């Protein structure tokens, strides 16, 4: 299975101490160079910068060779390159959280999930204590509506 990720899911999984879920759920994750740059940028949280400085063996960093187009040009560099890399590799799954990027990816026929989908799958597999992990996520700058959090928690209660 080929899984490409944008910055957000990796960033927030590091911040809540559950980055290992990506390896447990998916084996290998591929990120484009722009995502690597965003994770290692001076504006990224120190724990994220430290993690990407010595990436795990299950994380593959790849250069995008496919040219961009007008629609993806409207996205930020990480989202743009993640979608282009997913197209190039014919990815099975694309990890994205931002709504505009998700819409663009869906229009291109990709199966997508974000951090809540990852946590949902991990909870189904009994890999995490979902209420505690959701509380950790809510203490970060990640934002989704309270109703989405409640829906996820209700599904696993």
Image (cartoon, rainbow, N blue to C red):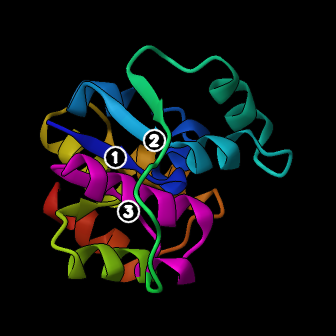
Highlighted range, magenta? 72-99
Q: Rounded to the nearest whole Å, what is the CA distance between mark 3 and mark 2?
A: 10 Å
* Residue that appears at 42% across and 80% down: 99
Badge 3 or badge 2: first in the primary sequence: 2
154 or 10, nearer to the observer: 10
Q: Kindly indicate the quadrant of the structure image that contains residue 69.
A: bottom left
Give the x, y percent position of residue 83.
Answer: 37, 62
Residue position for label 2? 31
Q: Residues within 10 Å of mark 1 (few under 14, many from 20)?
A: many
Give the x, y percent position of residue 20.
Answer: 40, 26
Seen as rendered, the residue at the extreme right is 42
Answer yes or no: do the residues labelled 2 and 1 have beta carbons within 8 Å?
A: yes
> Residue 83: which numbered mark, if any?
3
Badge 2 or badge 1: first in the primary sequence: 1
Q: Main secondary structure of the magenta part?
A: helix
Residue position for label 1? 4
> Residue 30: which numbered mark, if any?
none
């Amino acid at each position: 299975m080929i899984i490409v990720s944008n910055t957000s899911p990796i960033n927030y999984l590091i911040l809540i101490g559950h980055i290992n879920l990506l390896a447990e759920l998916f084996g290998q994750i591929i990120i484009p160079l722009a995502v690597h740059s965003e994770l290692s940028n001076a504006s990224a949280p120190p724990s994220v910068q430290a993690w990407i400085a010595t990436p795990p063996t299950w994380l593959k960093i790849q250069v995008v060779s496919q040219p961009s187009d007008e629609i993806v040009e409207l996205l930020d560099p990480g989202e743009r390159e993640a979608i282009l890399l997913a197209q190039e590799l014919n990815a099975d799954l694309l990890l994205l959280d931002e709504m505009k990027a998700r819409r663009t990816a869906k229009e291109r026929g990709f199966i997508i999930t974000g951090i809540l989908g990852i946590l949902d799958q991990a909870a189904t597999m009994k890999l995490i204590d979902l209420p505690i992990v959701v509380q950790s996520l809510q203490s970060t700058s990640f934002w989704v509506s309270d109703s989405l959090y409640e829906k996820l928690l209700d599904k696993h209660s």
